[in-house]
Amino acid sequence: MRNPSKIGLMATTASTVLFAGAALAQEALPAEPTQVEDIVVVGTNIRGARTTAALPVVVADREQIEATGATTGDELMRTIPQMGDVLFDSANNPQTSNSARGDVNSVNLRSLGVGNTLVLLNGRRLVQHPTSQGTSDTGTVPVLSYNSNAIPVSGLERLEVLLDGAAAIYGADAVAGVVNTVLRDNIDGLTVSARYGGAEGTQMRDTEFNLFTGKNFDRGNVSLFANYAQRTALWASDQDFTRSDDLRPLFAGDPDFAKVQSLDGRSSHTPWARLSVGSRPVIKSNGVNVTNATGAFHYQPGSFGCAVDVGDDICIATGNHAFNGAHRDMRYDTRHDTTVRPSVERLNLFLTGRYDLTDNVEAFGEVGYYSAHSRAVQPPVVNLNDIWIPASNYYNPFGPVTFADGTANPNRLPGLTGVPAEGLPVLMTNYRFVDTGFQVVKVDNYQARLLGGLRGEWRGFNWETAVVYSEAEAKDVSPNVNMTALQKQLALSTPDAYNPFSGGCVATTSYGDCSPSSQAAIDAIVFYLRRVSRTTLTMADFKLSRGDLFQLPGGPVGMAFGVEARRETQKDDRDANLDGTYTFTDMVSGETNLSNVSAVSPNPDTSGSREVFSTYVEFAVPVVSPEMNIPLVYQLDVQLAGRYEHYSDFGSVAKPKIAAAWDVVPGVRVRGSYSQGFRAPNLEQTHATQYARLANGMDYVRCEAQLRKGDIDNFSQCSQNTSGASLLVAGNPDLEPEESTNTSYGLVLQPSFIPERFGAFTFTIDKWRIEQEKIVGLLGAQTALALDYLNRVEGGSNPLVNRRAPTPEDILLFQGTGLTPVGEVVSINDRFINLQPQTVSGLDLAVNWSLRRTKYGTFIVNVNASKLDEFTRDPGDIVNELYAAREAGTINAGTTLPDSSQLVGQNGRPEWRLNASLTWRKGPWRAGMTSQYISDFQQPGLLGASGDPWVVDARQTVNAYVDYEFPAETRLRLGVRDLTDQGPPLADNGYRGSVHSPWGRYWYVTATKSF
């Protein structure tokens, strides 16, 4: 086995912090008696309700947050074991404006998927990030997320995470739970801080400045928090696991994966263009074949063979490139001179205020502002669409004998046969515009929030009302190639014509262009592609609560009632060259493409709005109190809640919740809950017209042909990727809503028999289960290709898979295999559907220990662990048919299929996540240590020669800091994350960005001064 024992690693993490504290406790001074009190946090609207004890809530205070060393909201969220994979992340995003780029990361409790977790700021909803994106979770379904990076980590007072369904309390979005971020307020004085840090062995550096200022008045307070942060880019060249798309050298030490060709992820879109004059008799130059029977030809360095020498050690050869064979090293390496993470400049401002209008009425308000500018360097633009190069092109080897102005053509090949005097147009398919330079992607994110409200007390009731307006905008700008302008430039008969016939660099065939087109040609075809997305949230609410509405034998009954009205809008304004305003019509073929952009599939503008009216009621019922002296029922409290919501565009829904806390004896509590949740399809899922995305997958029927001919030994050696194909996705107005049922039960122990000199202990264990129905998703490209493989082996085909006509090379590939020859995949049709049920369950464990005011200082230990027990989806009839065919041997055992029977321990769903922390303070000194453990997981999409999947190793990292307060309220902290420089474990993309960060040891220093 490659991995150490996961149990051993976890035991090390927990025992290190626990026993370190226990040993020091042996000489602890007598501590003052303490009483553990319930803290009212997210999960209820009743102040002081005892039923908060029934809720599984993780709370991190300011000291715990600082101990993580996190600088961004994403880094902080990744320290919470119950958080799943981060699906909005630069490591996962496609390199086009169809993804959410820039300073954005998603929130994903329980790995249920983006959109199933509600995020609050100071107890009220946040506006969602405006840019939608398809995720790998259920295909390329467009979803919206809250942007975790908009959370000002240094300004947090605490972070509260409700690990339970909360639709009955907060609304129908809280399927997996709720994250509430509480910012610092009521500041009196002035504090400034500065931080600098960076990751070893990289160019990534962080600089951050914070200001906290406020003033107490006789009847109120005004507080301001300001944060400015700057992060330089993380470059692919900084580390070996991101340096190249060709990962084969990194896996060479594992015999099972040493010959897996799919680990070479270099692109077939290169400056060495794929060209054709169409089916016609073979064209010859001075008796040498230049094209094959289908009219295909290509350029290549002379070292790869030479049919017709065109100078500078570049030759023309017949047919297409064999990128999976002899021409593999002519693939383009997209990592060359690009960034892994963009540079970011971020500003957060938050102003709060409160004022006592009367003795019983207080006015309060919030003004928040967030902006971020990011800059990423991505590979040069590719051509995803077929385009004909007119015969008149100055560099066309089959151009006219003389141009229209009468001048002789210097670039027409000599001695041509089969080419008329007026020349022939040339079809260009796969190509990369390397001479236009790298894509410098600039994204500006903006978010604002304005809140005003009143709160007070009336006849024993606490009431609160507020109006919130929040908006977010993202502007994505990147260079691209205008197809109409490109073809005009291709039609020129002067040296300023765009030249796709010169190839790349002979010395570095995987990157660079050593014979670029003229600057005038480049300037004529390049334009700046824009995507502007915007969301708004307008909300008004009224809340009423009372902790003692009436009396029961067990105590006072608490009640909360509220109404809420909100309006949500979303607008995604795509570039006019993408949304159908400006289309491309080929001047040679007359064919029309809805996209006038070479590297981005067509995408219509989308916009929509909805109004939601909600009302809720909640009761905190004390069934049994300690004064009743009932054996084995020391205390019993029940939470009852229900919420009704009406959607203007969808209909109505009502969802209940019940939770209970039973104290068997003092210090022993059993708790449990049952709730239902709901999520409506978003506007893009129901209203989208057909749009296209890249359909990455393996064309297994072509792999089968290679296997039968003996070209490969097993499917792991096959590299018949469909990187140039499109997935054509259509919306579905008949989608039904997603629904969920949540259950949980657990045990809380606060042992009173342990002497106080050993500190206060709390142990919790909770078992939870979430059942979802009708999840919106797609069948997916890989499943469609596997079905086509099965159908063709059986003599049929999958009509959803669209292919080119077989070329002579294709016919040769299938010759003697018994299979009907097929061409390469062009596109795959798909649409949004309600998938089969999904069930997720797991176990949460936590330990808290505190020992205060000893002669050695104060010690606090927190251990939080989450185990994923079950993650299953009913695969449906089609996938079940494919499994049966693989089991029967009808299709190869190496055919990758979605294993939805048990997804635990696969891809971004490790079985175990654990976070442990030990903090210590004494006098001017503070110190802390945290450890994070993530268990190993398989990658079923990467199979070795044995057919076994690659296992991403478990990782345990340790963070530490030491802090000293000098006189005059000046504090200095030195910290390190990933102390032992573990870095991310090796995965199919070099690392798994949705789970692990792409750097190792990170040092930082913080200075703070208060006035």
Image (tube, rainbow, N blue to C red):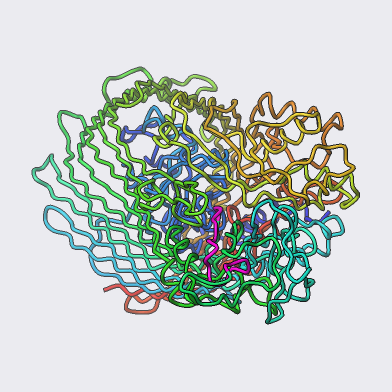
Tell me where residue 814 sits by quadrant. Answer: top right
Measuring from the top left, give residue 396's x and y in whole percent.
59, 68
> How many numbered circles are shown?
0
Q: Is residue 977 above or below residue 586?
A: below
Measuring from the top left, give residue 378's x and y in whole percent.
52, 66
Measuring from the top left, give residue 865's x and y in whole percent.
60, 46
For the C terminus, which image quadrant?
bottom left
Tell me where residue 418 sits by quadrant. Answer: bottom right
Q: Is residue 471 left or right of residue 162?
A: left
* Residue 216 covered by magenta stretch: no
Q: Which residue is at the front of the view, 218 or 581? A: 581
The residue positioned farthest toward the left in the image shown: 358
Q: Is residue 487 left or right of residue 49?
A: right
Measuring from the top left, give residue 498's x and y in whole percent.
51, 70
Q: Which residue is at the front of the view, 254 or 112? A: 254
Q: Is residue 276 above or below residue 335?
A: above
